[in-house]
Image (tube, rainbow, N blue to C red):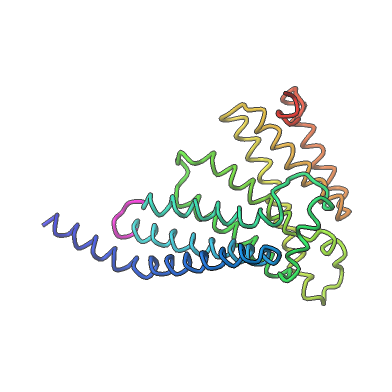
Amino acid sequence: MLKSNNVEKQQYYQRKISPFDANIKELLKKESTIITECRAEPATAAPKLFFLSDLMLDVTSNYLVINGIGQAILNTKDEASLSEAKKTVSKALIYLQNVVTVKVDAPFSEYEDALAELAPIDAAQRCQLVKKFGLSISLLKAAYGNNTKWRWVFVDMEGHCAAVSKNLLDLKKAQASNDPSSQDYEPLLYHAYFAKKMLSDAADRFHSRYMLATKSNEDLWKAGNFLNALRRIHIIFNERDEAEEVKKKYNSWVAALGTELKNPVSKS
């Protein structure tokens, strides 16, 4: 009787996940087609890479739904689906990184030309993708749970997300946007808010990983690098009080640890 119930549950589970499996296959076909187009016309690939990034997050959402169905019906995590969801978030970040770079604390002039290739993508689309990244990673972390062995791995993913989200923002447009009637005003405002929050969170998480897990100078340097990037943006937006608070935080970390937050690679 018990075996029969298990078989019925498995069959019911397979029926429920079938449309999401189909969605994933269709989305991956689109990915393959767009990659071919990018290789054929690399000069116009940037907007397509942006779309590929968004597409991969759609794949992620389908894998997360499959895991949720498995938990509801079979009372267990679908480790395979979660693993694929993690991979597709990483792919989404890499696609976007290939356009806007993954530099953290760098002046806008260093990646401005690369960002210009995304001119066809408006401010609202960019802001929406940043929000989608944040939601996808939050849902993925929640699906794994607090005690997962991937806890500290997610710190790297969130740092990667903070970097590309910041670099996706056209800082010149955002700085100059002071007309509330403009269609770009709100998306630029929110994008800047999300970018600053992600940088702040990334700094805190690398610092926590240093303190609680690794004691690695590299984590310590990354924490400081994200703080410096955050301070740079506050200065660009003339947010002097916020910039000073970030500086104080940076200095307090230095004082508490009795060290300097320097790139460990540069010391060798």
Say which of 2 and 50 sits in front.
Answer: 50
Q: x, y percentage for residue 94?
A: 61, 53
Magenta-colored span: 72-77
The answer to which quarter of the image holds residue 9 is bottom left
Say which of 105 and 182 sits in front.
Answer: 105
- Residue located at (34% from left, 58% from top): 70
**Quadrant position of the C terminus in the picture:** top right
**Quadrant position of the N terminus in the picture:** bottom left
- Residue located at (78% from left, 71% from top): 184
The answer to which quarter of the image holds residue 117 is bottom right
Q: x, y percentage for residue 53?
A: 59, 61
Say which of 102 and 15 sits in front.
Answer: 102
Say which of 205 and 130 sits in front.
Answer: 130
Relative to residue 214, is residue 235 depicted above or below? Answer: below
Q: Is residue 208 left or right of residue 175?
A: left
Extreme-front residue of the structure? 40
Q: x, y percentage for residue 180?
A: 82, 73
- Residue located at (49% from left, 51% from top): 86
Q: x, y percentage for residue 163?
A: 69, 49
Task: Report how many numbered discs are placed on residues in the image.
Answer: 0
Q: Is residue 177 left or right of residue 15?
A: right
Q: Is residue 170 left or right of residue 156?
A: right
The answer to which quarter of the image holds residue 155 is top right
Relative to residue 36, is residue 267 depicted above or below? Answer: above
- Asked if the stretch drawn in magenta spans residue 91, the answer is no
